[in-house]
Amino acid sequence: MNIVNMMWAGGSPYMSIHKVHQQVLSHAGADASISNWLLLGGELCHGRGPTRVWHIPQRVLKGKSLWRLLLPWQRLRLRRALQQARADVILLDGVGVARLVLPVLHQVPGIRVKVLFHGSTRLNASDVRLLNQLPPERLSIAAVSQTLARSLEQDIGRPVQALRMAFDPQAFARPLLSREQARQALALPQATGQVLGAVGRLVESKGFAMLIEAFAKGAANRPDMRLAIVGDGPLRTSLAAQIDALGLTGRVLLCGHHDDLQQLYRAFDWLLVPSRAEGLGLVVQEAVMADLPVICSDLPVFREQLREAGLYLPVGDVEAWSQAIERCDAPSAQAMAARQREALAPEAAWQAFCDGAQKLLRG
């Protein structure tokens, strides 16, 4: 089976998408031939097989203004490349890639298409028509959470497979660093006080500005407590200015992007996830599998994973988050982590993901 894994772009902003696609494709079978196509450019963060970078301008991909006139040429290139690759299956990264590729497939009838949604997307009427033009035997739609799958089913009007991302628990645990090693890798002070962690792109939807404000209040009487934010992005400069303005220099640390993040969770005593919206939020799973307790925004995708064991807080509520930070302590952390691991059920989740990935690729 020849599979083309087609994604929007490469680089660290798209690392979680690459990770999900890699996990899905790991169930394609040893005999599968996989190639990765990045439409905008960048580098593949995770993947098997060769990579082709297309360097299609974003304005063309989004069909803006007169740039849409170049879309037929790009689709012709794609059609020829798919025919040369003798692709049997294409795995597409969401509706943005689907808008470009699906019109091509009417002229390449032998290919089966799998569209994988990673987060909430505003589908317009033309998107819905596009996704319904190919028959079910040629087009399958999947989403990385049950919450997202239900929402898409309502919008599109056809079945959407819930393929909740999961990890092999044993493979995940093997490379985990100890507390001391992980803190050294993140250049964190080897202090006895608690370190609260937060992970993600430094963008508005992750809620880090609110979290820093809440930390300033909640940890005001805990001078030995630290907040370490791992990730990079366009808000780094403004977050650094906020930290300085609140007098938190040395207590709130912007640790930058780390490719080996999965190894580093034990640097923290708690993980805080103040996201405003998420398609799944892989960091919740990763933290729980590293035996780290999680405090997160009250979002359906987090409740789907942690159920009654979650510690959920209102989105963007500084007062609620500051109170939760004030209550973070070592004795309650271990018990919370154990309850959340039981709720997540990593072994069962992994088996369900394996079965779902095989169904998606083979169906």
Image (cartoon, grey):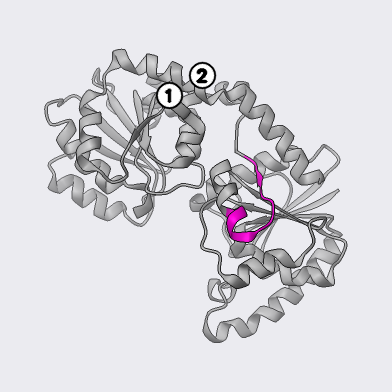
Q: Is residue 56 visible?
A: no
Q: Is residue 68 left or right of residue 80?
A: left
Residue 309 numbered mark, or none: 1
- Residue placed most toward the observer, 49 or 103: 103
Q: Which residues are magenta?
A: 152-163
Please indicate, yes or no, whether residue 183 appears anywhere in the rendered image: yes
**Residue 38, horizontal then vertical, whole percent:** 64, 59
Q: Residue 90 is drawn in which quadrant?
A: bottom right
Question: Residue 294 location in percent, x, y?
Answer: 39, 29
Quarter of image, res 228: top left
Residue visible at 16% across and 46% down in the picture: 244
Q: Which residue is mark 2?
A: 342
Q: As drawn, is 232 to the left or to the right of 76? A: left
User: CB of mark 1 within 8 Å of CB of mark 2?
Assistant: yes
In the depicted structure, whether residue 305 falls above or below residue 142: above
Please say if 326 is above or below 241.
above
Q: What's the amino acid at mark 2?
A: Glu
Q: Residue at 64% of width from left, 24% of height from top?
A: 348
Residue beneath the point at 39% across and 48% down: 232
Q: Nearer the viewer, residue 165 or 20?
A: 165
| Tag 1: amino acid | Ala
